[in-house]
Amino acid sequence: MNRIKAGIWLFAALITVSMVKAQSIDDGKKFLYYEKYKSAQSVFQKLVNADPNNAEAVYWLGQTYLRNADNPDTVAAKSLYQKAVMASNNNPLLLVAMGQIELMENKTQEARNHFETAISLTQGKNIAVLNAIGFANTNAKAGDASYAIDKLKQATLVKGFKDADVYLNLGDAYRKFSNDGAEPVKAYQAALVIDPNNAKALYRIGKVYQSQGKIQEDLFLNYYSQAVAKDPGFTPVYYNLYDYYYETNAPKAAENLDKYLTAMGSDEPRECYLRASSLFTVGKFSEVITKANECMSSGGTEPYVKLYALKGYAYMRLLDSNNAKTSFDTYFKKQHVDLITAKDVSVYIALLLRDPHADTTIIPGLVDRALKMDTTEVGKVDLLKTMAVHYENAKQYKDAADWYKKVLSVKKTPSKTDVFNAGYNYFKADDYTDAITVWDIYTTDFPSDILGFDMKGRSQRSIDSTLQNGLANESFQKSVDIGEAAWGTDSVRVKTALMRAYKYFIEYSYNVKKDKQAAIMWADKVLAKDPNDVEVQNYKKAFSAPTPPARPTPPRLGSTRPTTPPATPKTGGNGTAPKKK
């Protein structure tokens, strides 16, 4: 009988070992590579259940909790790692895992201590430990990218090194450290030398070029094509293309969404949400709301949180601000703070600005938060212009100017319109000192444009109202020089500013310099270009009279709006398509 029991026990043990061997660490890592978090978690959980002391399996199980960008579970990962570190007597890989958690909690010094201890215990020669440190510092907001680069480079020098994943993480670290795409691409290419079929490396190179804008579209799309040619099951490419085409090409977006969901299979818990979101791309906003409600009903007590944001975007497109705000209020309450996007915050700000009963005191903080979150120049500029346009429409010109001025610090190459918007709103707010500061930017960046010197002169004249200090002389002289040089080919554009400069010097010459002949000379310049200017005709007659008249009253040089540079559409958070990741 005992032999029978022993045989049964041995058979069961062999079955367990067989099942564990059937799914290895590498199998789980492969699922992570494809971003199939459910399957990866299942593999690592079985390995941990079979051997709780398997530190590598524990490390990777925790990574399945943390790396799911759509639904990270830091609480579960922290609990898992804390228990494992204590049970393992400070296993180096698990110490790194704890450091990763501490970075996510902004405990940078504690994290660094754990990393350095792990390096010391392994004498700096364990590739997995160095790679994990590099990954942690690259992917945590509080991580140190230069430290990550140093440790990942150190890993490549370890004898026997041939780990493509280290180079992938090195490329990501370079991207975090600098906007220069050369070093990341070199690192990703090094990964391809080790593993020529590595779709992730090709995808990452494509992402570098995509970050440079549409001008590189042919190049990055080519890399994405190469990636799926190497590995048709590499799901991140399909999702990225779905996201890329989401707002511009609904059929291509739908095509890539289908490929993504097919490749993911049961691993994609967001399928209902993504199907609802795809309706947004074709403008079926009422159907978006209906589908989102169906998804929520089937989601039980805790439906997929992004559905609330999706409904908010749809309601905005339907011009239903009240329901949009209600949806976003719920979304912000339920969503993890790290998963709320800059676009979500920008749109919520736009809703608050529209609501006369909203608590607007929270808006500046929300703007700062969105600006820190948004990695794109376009997104930041759109948000700042949303704020500026709101205050400009409310005729709060000083506030509008302050927001427009922030655009100048965000854009790499501000346009004439960008600078003009800031300077002119300061001018309208009678804040001539700040206006002059901005017009100095305009005249420096666009020295051949008469508008900047004209507006700077008008601002200076407003400060020096009696003209006694001649504060505007230099600016208006530049207007004269530019205007006269352009008169033969571009008189329509320069006429208003040139006439204003001439009339300024009529007044300055007569009333400040007491030089009647100079005043007449400036009057003649006006009449040579506009013989029908009755005002200046009368000035000249008065100046030429035997008995000089009292001080002439010049036109108000700051009374009319100048001709603006080519208009750039003012944009803002008004319900553009929601981002999904």
Image (cartoon, grey):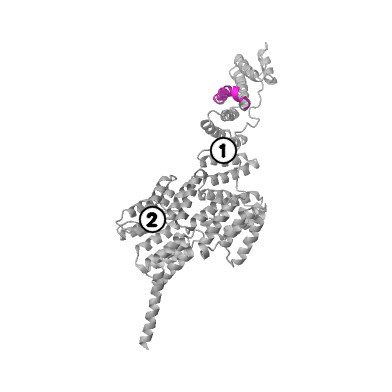
Query: Please, which residue is most extreme toward the front here?
Result: 229
At x 61%, y 14%, the residue is 517
Q: Which of the labelled discs sits on residue 552, or is there none?
A: none
Q: Mark 2 points at which residue?
A: 195
Disc 1 marks which amino acid?
Asp
SS type, badge 1: helix
Q: In which quarter of the image is the N terminus?
A: bottom left
Packing grade of label 1 (10 A; few <14, some 14-19, many >=20) is many
Of residues 271 and 407, the one nearer the viewer is: 271
> Which label's residue is closer to the chain start, 2 or 1?
2
Q: Where is residue 333 in the image (x, y as percent from the top left)?
A: 57, 59
Q: Quadrant of residue 403?
A: top right
Residue 5: x and y, percent?
Answer: 38, 85
Q: How far apart are marks 2 and 1 (CA)?
A: 47 Å
Magenta stretch: give its range: 473-492
Front-most of residues 542 and 322:
322
Visible residue check, residue 113? no
Image location (x, y in percent) of residue 516: 61, 15
Confirm whether residue 274 shows in the render.
Answer: yes
Check disc 1 and report the residue beneath it. 418
Mark 2: which secondary structure?
A: loop
- Horizontal side of residue 240 vs 541, given as left or right: left
**In the rendered view, does 303 fall on the left or right side of 138?**
right
The amino acid beneath tag 2 is: Asp
Q: In this view, does 144 lie to the left or right of 506?
A: left
